[in-house]
Image (tube, helix red, strand yellow):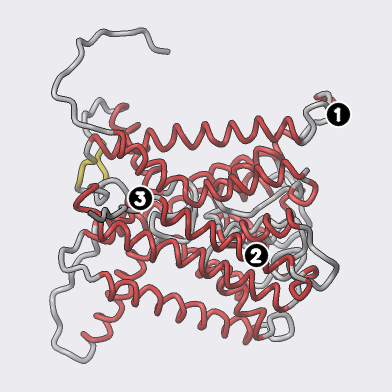
């Protein structure tokens, strides 16, 4: 009798990303992909991993070392990594949600399946169409505002990189050359936020916009309120951007004259707050920012964007659930309340577990990198290295791509560790939660309880 082997759903995203990274590594190592000398296998692997995991950390200059063919390969990996993970994992979750109950375990599944009339094919077609439309409009805007800097290919490359929250730039100084340009900054910030709020939220907003246009020509109907999940994502996103903006402005400019106009100071602080959503572009020299600014940026990078988006991190829904949990304990309330709903116990437990696992992963990688990148150097001679390494690890885990300048100087072992962190950071939250779910079972008995001194 012929037996069917059931493919583990967790292996599909891993296999997809692994195959793209392997193909990208080979493509970037080819002579036709380089313009300024051959790229080593380790650098090709690092770049392919960074592009596929939409991170943006680079060990070589993307615009200077790679030819148009190589840049096109990177662009393809960015698009596949940014959009592919949503389409493939959404398909898995939609097909298997009844069996493994992922609808209440992963926020993206909750966003996709809250409507029982949900049509997977129509949804995937919708996100693909809207992605291409947004990127095309943004590329046209960039080319129109600065045609001498953003050629046709360059405009498309940066538009895709920004929407997919990849952070790759063809300019050696990222976007520092546009530090005072409000128009260019606005296009990038809109792209970053659009790619970071999640496709379910983006599709709901697009539907509301379409309905509003239709209502202008038809008889007015009662407006349908936005879903609780979308409001949660948008409000938390706005809070993190504004809070990060204020914190970075105070940490970077108050008491530290930078010889910049006041409007430019506000713009650069806002842009860095937005780009910490895992985009990776910068209009300031990260290596020259204050320690307070770096700490604020690490917190923002660790949180990241929304589930089901191009962003990484532990996700803003996890952050909001943890915040509601802390507030509930401070107020002596049994339930963690967000808006008009209270979170169930399993959601709160998952948020706590995800936070714990993520912190342990970051600390472990930081420890190993401190060994590989100068473990024999005495502390007085390595001042600042720990912060640089921690910033690099958080940036890789959050798939951000910001760096204080350490990335090109990493050892081979260090590059492999950061590449692994980018891979884990892109797939880790989904794998951790799903892996935990596979080991969970409902016990029909309880142990006797006892109090213990804590704190």
Residue in the foreground of this view, choosing between 93 and 206: 93
Q: Position of residue 10 (x, y in %)?
A: 39, 50
**Which type of secondary structure does the marked residue at label 2 adopt?**
loop
Residue in the foreground of this view, choosing between 215 and 119: 119
Residue annotated with mark 2: 168
**Which type of secondary structure does the marked residue at label 1 adopt?**
helix
Residue annotated with mark 1: 381
Left or right of 302? Residue 321 is left
Farthest-out residue, bottom: 217
- Tell us which disc is closer to us: 3 or 2: 3
Does residue 155 sit above or below 179 in this rendering? below
Residue annotated with mark 3: 8
How many numbered discs? 3
Q: Quadrant of residue 275?
A: bottom right
Residue at position x 21%, y 41% in the image: 342
Left or right of 322? Residue 393 is right
In terms of sequence position, does the residue under pointer 3 or pointer 1 come before the other?
A: 3
Does residue 79 sit above or below 388 in this rendering? below
Residue at position x 18%, y 26% in the image: 443
């Amino acid at each position: 009798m012929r037996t069917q082997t059931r493919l583990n759903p967790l292996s599909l995203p891993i296999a997809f990303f692994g195959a793209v990274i392997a193909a990208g590594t080979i493509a970037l190592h080819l002579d036709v992909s380089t313009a300024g000398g051959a790229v080593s296998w380790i650098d090709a692997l690092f770049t392919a991993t960074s592009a596929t995991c939409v991170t943006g950390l680079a060990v070589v200059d993307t615009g200077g070392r790679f030819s148009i063919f190589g840049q096109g390969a990177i662009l393809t990996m960015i698009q596949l990594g940014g959009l592919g993970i949503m389409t493939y994992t959404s398909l898995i979750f939609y097909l298997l949600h009844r069996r493994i109950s992922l609808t209440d375990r992963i926020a993206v599944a909750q966003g996709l399946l809250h409507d029982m009339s949900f049509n997977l094919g129509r949804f995937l077609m919708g996100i693909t169409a809207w992605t291409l439309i947004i990127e095309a409009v943004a590329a046209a805007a960039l080319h129109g505002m600065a045609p001498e800097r953003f050629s046709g290919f360059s405009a498309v490359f940066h538009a895709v990189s920004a929407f997919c929250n990849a952070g790759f730039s063809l300019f050696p100084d990222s976007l520092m050359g546009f530090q005072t340009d409000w128009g260019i900054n606005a296009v990038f910030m809109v792209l970053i936020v659009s790619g970071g709020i999640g496709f379910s939220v983006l599709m709901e907003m697009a539907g509301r916009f379409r309905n509003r246009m239709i209502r202008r020509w038809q008889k007015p109907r009662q407006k349908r309120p936005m879903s609780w999940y979308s409001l949660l994502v948008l409000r938390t996103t706005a809070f993190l951007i504004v809070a990060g903006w204020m914190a970075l402005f105070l940490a970077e400019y108050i008491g530290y004259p930078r010889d910049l106009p006041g409007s430019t100071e506000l713009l650069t602080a806002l842009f860095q707050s937005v780009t910490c959503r895992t985009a990776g572009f910068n209009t300031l020299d990260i290596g020259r920012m204050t320690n307070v600014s770096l700490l604020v940026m690490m917190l923002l990078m660790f949180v990241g964007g929304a589930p089901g988006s191009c962003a990484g991190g532990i996700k803003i829904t996890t952050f909001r659930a943890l915040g509601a949990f802390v507030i509930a304990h401070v107020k002596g309330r049994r339930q963690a309340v967000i808006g008009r709903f209270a979170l169930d116990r399993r959601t709160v437990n998952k948020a706590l577990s995800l936070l714990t696992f993520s912190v342990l992963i970051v600390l472990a990688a930081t420890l190993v990198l401190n060994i590989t990148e100068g473990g024999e150097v005495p502390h007085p001679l390595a001042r600042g290295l720990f912060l640089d390494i921690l910033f690099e690890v958080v940036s890789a885990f959050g798939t951000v791509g910001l760096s204080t300048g350490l990335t090109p100087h990493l050892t081979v072992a260090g590059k492999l560790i950061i590449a692994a962190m980018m891979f884990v950071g892109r797939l880790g939250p989904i794998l951790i939660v799903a892996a935990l779910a596979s080991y969970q079972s409902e016990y029909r008995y309880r142990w006797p309880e006892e109090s213990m001194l804590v704190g």
